[in-house]
Image (tube, helix red, strand yellow):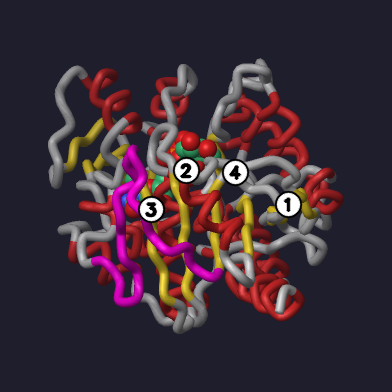
Amino acid sequence: MRWDVFCRVIDNYGDIGVCWRLAADLAGRGQQVRLWVDEPAALDWMAPHGCPGVEVRPWREPWCAVEPAEVVVEAFGCDPPEAYIERMASCRPAPVWINLEYLSAEDYVERSHGLPSPRWHPPGAGLVKRFFYPGFTSRTGGLLREPGLLERRAAFDGAAWLARQGLTVRPQERVVSLFCYDNPRLSLWLEALTEQPTLLLVTPGQAAGQVAALLGHAPREGHTDTVGALRLHWLPALTQTEFDQLLWACDLNVVRGEDSFVRAQWAARPFIWHIYPQSDAAHALKLEAFLDRYLEGADPGTAAALRALWRAWNGLSAELGALHPSRWPAPTVWRAHAARWCETLARQADLSTQLLDLARTSKARSG
Ligand code: TRH
C-alpha cells in the first residue's frame, strides 16, 4: 500500500524520531511511504542514509496538489493540510485515515484505541478518522518493534561497540548512558556517581549542556573527563540505529520522551525515564501509570526502590536519597527485571503489524 505519514515537529526529536521509525518499519515490510515533515533537519544525523521505500517530503504552505495515498497517518493529531483533506474526501474509495496518538500506559488508552471519529463538515465531510493508541497491553496498538530487532540485540557485542568509540570498560565499572531534559537533580546524581566506578556516556544537547556547566567547560565530543571514580565520555549525535546500539551496550540507560523510552525497553536493560514534563502536571499520572504496569510482579524491594528513584529523578518526590546508587536494586536483579519486562512486551503484536491490519481491514470494508 501507499502511505502518507504527516509529522509536525513541536520540539526536540521525538516527533520526527517516532515518525521516522514508523516510516522505515513500514517500508521494511514492503510498503511505500511518503513522510511529510515541516522540520526535517534532525534527519540529517538521525537517518543520514535514508531508507529504501521512504521518501521524505517537505510539509509547506501553500500545500502542493498531490494525490492522497491509500493510507494516511497523522502523527500526534498534527492536522494534515486542509487542501489535502479536501482531496481525500473526493477519493473513491476514501483513504484510510489514522491518527497515531502519544504513548501512555494510562487506562483511557484501551478505551480509546481504535475509536472512529466521523467527519460531518468540510473539508473532510464523509471521512472517518480512526484513533490509534500505542500501548503496553493487548488491547492497545502496541509498540514499534521492527522484525528481527530482538535477535539483532541478542547477537550484539557491546564491548566491540564501545571499543569503536575508543572506550574500554574497566573492571567493576557500570556503563551508563545519559539522554535527558534539563534536570536540577542532575548535579546530586553525578556527585553520587563519582563515588562508584562509572563510565557515563553523555549525549549531545541538554544532557551535555548541563554536565558541561557543572564541570565548567564546554562538551568535548569524543573526549573523556574523569571526576573521582566517574569517567564522562562526550558522545557525538548518533544515528537512530547507533542510538539503539548505545542502549544495548550500557548497563543502565537514562532516556526521555517517547521513542528513546520505548527503545530502552527493547534494550532489556535497567533504565530511568525522564518523562516529558507537561505544564498541567499530567506527566505525574502518566509516570505512575507506567510504573504500575512495569513494576507488576517485581519483588517489593525492587519496586519500591525503582518507584522512588524515578519519582526523584522527575522531581515528583523530595526523597532525593533514592537517586544514590546504594539505594538502587542490585544490578543483576534490576537487569533480570528489565529482561522479563521486555519478554512480556514482545508477546504483544507490534505497532506496525497492527497498523497494517487496521489499514487492510478498513480498506476492504470501504470497498
Ligand atoms: O527528544 P524527545 O524529548 O522528544 C519528544 C518531543 O519532545 C515531543 O514533542 C514529545 O511529544 C515526546 O518527546 C514525548 O525524546 P524521544 O521521544 O526519545 O526522541 C529522541 C529521538 O532522538 C529518538 O528517536 C532517538 C533519537 N536520537 C538519535 O537518533 N541519536 C542520538 O544521538 C540521540 C541522543 C537521540
Quadrant position of residue 180 = top left
Pick whichever, 247 or 64, lies toward us: 64
Is residue 351 depicted above or below 274 in this figure?
below
Which three-letter amino acid code belongs to the residue tagged 3?
Answer: Trp
**Distance from label 2 to label 1 (Cα)?**
38 Å
Q: Which residues are magenta?
A: 50-70
Query: For ligand 1, which image quadrant applies?
Result: top left
Residue bearing mark 1: 294
Secondary structure beneath label 2: loop
Which three-letter amino acid code belongs to the residue tagged 1?
Answer: Tyr
**Distance from label 3 to label 2 (Cα)?**
11 Å
Residue 36 image label: 3
* Mark 3 surroundings: few (<14), some (14-19) or many (≥20) residues within 10 A: many
Secondary structure beneath label 4: loop
Q: Residue at x 24, y 48 (%)?
A: 237
**Distance from label 3 to label 1 (Cα)?**
34 Å
Residue 81 image label: 2
**Distance from label 4 to label 2 (Cα)?**
10 Å
Residue 123 image label: 4
Pick whichever, 313 or 325, lies toward us: 313
Q: Earlier in the sequence, mark 3 or mark 4?
A: 3
Secondary structure beneath label 1: helix
Q: Earlier in the sequence, mark 3 or mark 2?
A: 3
Which label sits in the foreground, 3 or 4?
4
Which label sits in the foreground, 3 or 2?
2
Residue at disc 3, CB closer than 8 Å to ligand 1 = no
Quadrant position of residue 358 = bottom right
Q: Earlier in the sequence, mark 4 or mark 1?
A: 4
